[in-house]
Amino acid sequence: MKLIIAIIKPFKLEEVKQALSEIGVEGMTVTEVKGFGRQKGHTEIYRGSEYTVDFLPKVKLEIALPDELIAKAVDAIVNAAKTGKIGDGKVFVMPVDEVVRIRTDERGEAAV
Amino acid sequence: MKQRSTHLTSGLKMLGIFMFLALFSSAFAQEAAEAAPYADLAAFSESPGFSLFTVNNVWMMLATALVFIMHLGFATVESGLTQSKNTVNILFKNTLIPCIGLLTYALCGFNLMYPGVAGGWFAFAGFGVGVTDPVAALTDVYNPGYTYWTDFLFQGMFAATAATIVSGAVAERIKLGQFLIFSTLFVAISYPITGYWKWGNGWLNTMDTPFYDFAGSSLVHSVGGWGALAGVLLLGPRLGKYRNGKVFPILGHSMPLATIGVFLLWLGWFGFNGGSVLSANPGLTSLVLVTTCLAAAAGGVGAAFTSWIVLKKPDLSMALNGILAGLVGITAGADQMAAVSATVIGLIAGILVVFSVLFFDKLQIDDPVGALSVHLVCGIFGTLAVGIWGNLAGTAQLISQLKGIVAIGIFTFAFAFVVFWVLKKLGGIRVSAEEETEGLDIGEHGNEAYPDFTTAHK
């Protein structure tokens, strides 16, 4: 079992979710986050004073999947989230020690 | 021009009626100047003047309600232009100020402002409000435009608006208790005293060329502004606003709320200026509404384009401040201006307010909502405008305006400064750095304005 953490541009969320459901991914958790990589921020001005906004709004997806689905899921996310412009985001894949379904107490792959 | 009926005017009215009657019947000659023209309220309601009086009074009551709604306008403007972690605190202050204002006005403010003594600096007609002689208080004997009760409430709504101007400038760092103490003293004592000088027929009104302030550019707005200035000087700027000579903006959390607030204030000004005619006189009220709206519109445009040119981008909060600046600017002379002068006054006020906001930031005087720029700077400008444009323009008037501005400024600023200074010495007027960072909603109220939303900037 692995956990995919993907940081994407907010407007790509619907497209990514669609692409994932097409390959059989049944659930995910989404958080609104801020961040930056090589994409620089921009300058804003409020009542005469300038300030830089470095942190840009992004969306973070967390998806736990059995090993067989990981490669397809990563491809689906990358293709759906790509715009070709700077700031498209990143995908991380991490090992998972344990998964539990709270309702039924199922553990392991059955819970994913 | 705003003038409450004093005993002198009522006496003259009664004398006039007496003389008219005396022409036709010497039997009335013994009844002297104390006899009211109506035996009772029923007699008044059958008299020819009743309908007109009723119409006038209805308009004044409507104007009272319009001025009342300005408190919602202040509440929303101030919350919109400040951070969400302080919203409960801002709303609490804006909720309590009108309440305190009305109560103190009933207790002592009304009788400090209209003591019935001509030409003085200070007089007091006693605590409490009430009617002992219905005919003298509730008919056109009191005033052709309104009853005693309407007079009290209309003026009472004005008093609270002066106090609430201060709350925006001192927002996000003042201790609640100390602010409430200051506001109570300010609205109960300082505002009525300076108000008396002009509207209560005090010394500013009895000068050779009387000082002129139609609806309160000085008596309400600059008074609030001086109070705000004293407060912000003793409070200091918000944490992190000025660092190493640079200005770091602290963003308001809701531009929609700020916009709602400004338009509510504009709506309220229909009553603020329209009601200051003190009757429903069609010619005067319709003129005043037009000058008011033209000035507001020109202020908005002036500020919007000034910010666009000077700051490279059009700033919404500046445009909003511009509308208010135009309104404050026309308030001293709304009944004296033609359409063109009203527009020019509004335009200048709108341009002025943008530069004023930048100027105060340069001096590191932190004013989260621009209250000093809108109410103090444009209040002074609006007062001077009466001597520069319109029917009263002239050197003598300009000098009288200056006298009023200076006298009101010195008294109000000194009063506010002393109160804040004493409160500062007695226990401080500023919240701790920790509380300011966490937000006054938690610190002062143990409450949150938006408990269901996650905030990223706590």
Image (cartoon, rainbow, N blue to C red):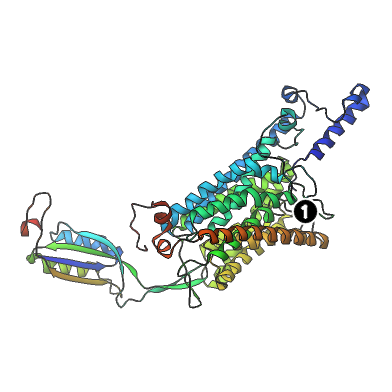
What secondary structure is marked by label 1?
loop
- The x and y percentages for residue B263 are 55, 52
- Residue at the spot of label 1: B204
Foreground: B273 or B42?
Answer: B42
Give the number of callouts.
Answer: 1
- On screen, B57 above or below A67? above
Q: Quadrant of the N terminus of chain A?
A: bottom left
Which residue shows up at 47% across the image and 58% down it?
B255
- Badge 1 amino acid: Leu
Foreground: B441 or B150?
Answer: B441
- On screen, B401 above or below B32? below
* Location of residue B285 (image quadrant): top right
Q: Is residue B270 visible?
A: no
* Location of residue B437 (image quadrant): bottom left
- The x and y percentages for residue B259 are 51, 55
Q: Quadrant of the C terminus of chain A?
A: bottom left
Which residue shows up at 90% across the image and 31% down it?
B19
* Chain letter for the residue marked with disc 1 in the picture: B
Which residue shows up at 78% across the image and 25% down it?
B38
* Location of residue B354 (image quadrant): bottom right
Q: Is residue B387 visible?
A: yes
Left/right of residue A31 with respect to residue A42 in the rendered view: left
Left/right of residue B218 with respect to residue B47 in the rendered view: left
Left/right of residue B100 with respect to residue B379 in the rendered view: left
What is the residue that sits farthest to the front in this orientation?
A: B426
Foreground: A42 or B375?
Answer: B375
- The x and y percentages for residue A67 are 8, 66
* Residue density around tag 1, few if under 14, some if 14–19, many if 20 or more, within 10 Å: many
Foreground: B451 or B54?
Answer: B451
- The x and y percentages for residue B74 are 54, 52
- On screen, B228 above or below B54? below
